[in-house]
Image (cartoon, helix red, strand yellow):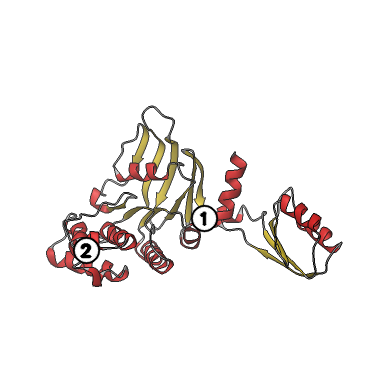
Amino acid sequence: MELLKLEGVTYLYEGTANGISDIHFMASEGDFIAVVGKNGAGKSTLLNLLSGIYRPQAGTITCPPELTYHDLGISTQKQSIDWYLNVHDNIRLGAVLTGMHKKEADQATDAISEILELSDLYQRSPDSLSGGQQQRVQVARALVHNPRIMLLDEPTAGLDFRYSQRLFAYLQEKCRKERHLILVSSHDLAMLEDYCTKILYLDQGRQLYFGEMNAFLDSHQVMREISVSFSGDLSERLRETLSHAGASVDDQSVVFTESDSINLNQIIGSLLKEVPITGIESKRIGLKDIMLQREEGLK
């Protein structure tokens, strides 16, 4: 079932060309969408539009008529927890504002707090928490009412790997079992690659790609990361040649991304003239490397 549709959505900040332009995609229940792009690409602008914080200057954003604002769960980059409430009441407020009764709100608060390991912090004030703890409280308040559409802008900022993984695993279950729709922006590209099913790739406010994450990754696997190990010493001249070509050279290996300017046969041929090769490994290119390569190509 389609939950969100954008057609030609544009929003530019006054007096600038910054923002987003002509964004178009359709998202369905069960989609876990990574919103990616370098700083200034328009990720936060898009999520703010979907959240209702901004209104499109052109184009339309539509969803099924039975959905209400309470079906949204929103966590912005800007800290939005209430400093005069303790942790428990901050989270519970997210449930109460959507109309939950007292018992239901208490149960929902306890459930999301257990997942994000916040129960022991219930009586603490926000200003006594670390940045990562504050972030967990904000995300918990956004998700406590179990919204059908979740819009999360950098939800793992300040979180260590364990908490980030726990959150993404929870979000993945929401998509798989309850068919929620999630759009998430994060600098943790490895986490997005591991958990998200689709990707929306923005650059300078333009939509470069929207589709399946696996298809996006597979389409870039012509560029492999290859590691060639060797024994012996390389000449300084060869080290410099390899480095200038984009390879990383240490005492016992050469690591590079295969491309038009440098390929496996060239590396092997150069190495065999000086040292014995002891092994060759090829690794799938990840989302981080793909984005770096694409951004270099866009310059």
Q: Is mark 2 on a helix, strand or loop?
A: helix
Label 2 crowding class (10 Å Cα cut-off): few <14, some 14-19, many 20+? many
Res. 245 in view:
no
Q: What residue type is labelled 1?
A: Met
Q: What element carries label 1?
A: helix
Judge left or right: residue 36 versus residue 97.
right
Kindly identify which residue carries mark 1: 213
Q: Residue at x 80, y 66 (%)?
A: 233
Q: Residue at x 49, y 63 (%)?
A: 194
Kindly identify which residue carries mark 2: 87
The spot of residue 5 in percent (x, y) is 38, 44
Judge left or right: residue 288 versus residue 25.
right
Label 1 crowding class (10 Å Cα cut-off): few <14, some 14-19, many 20+? many
Q: Which amino acid does label 2 sit on?
A: Val
Q: Residue at x 20, y 59 (%)?
A: 90
The spot of residue 79 in percent (x, y) is 29, 52
The spot of residue 287 in percent (x, y) is 55, 55
Query: From the image, which quarter does the C terminus lie in?
Result: top right
Res. 143 in view:
yes
Residue 204 vertical position relative to residue 241 in the rendered view, above or below: above
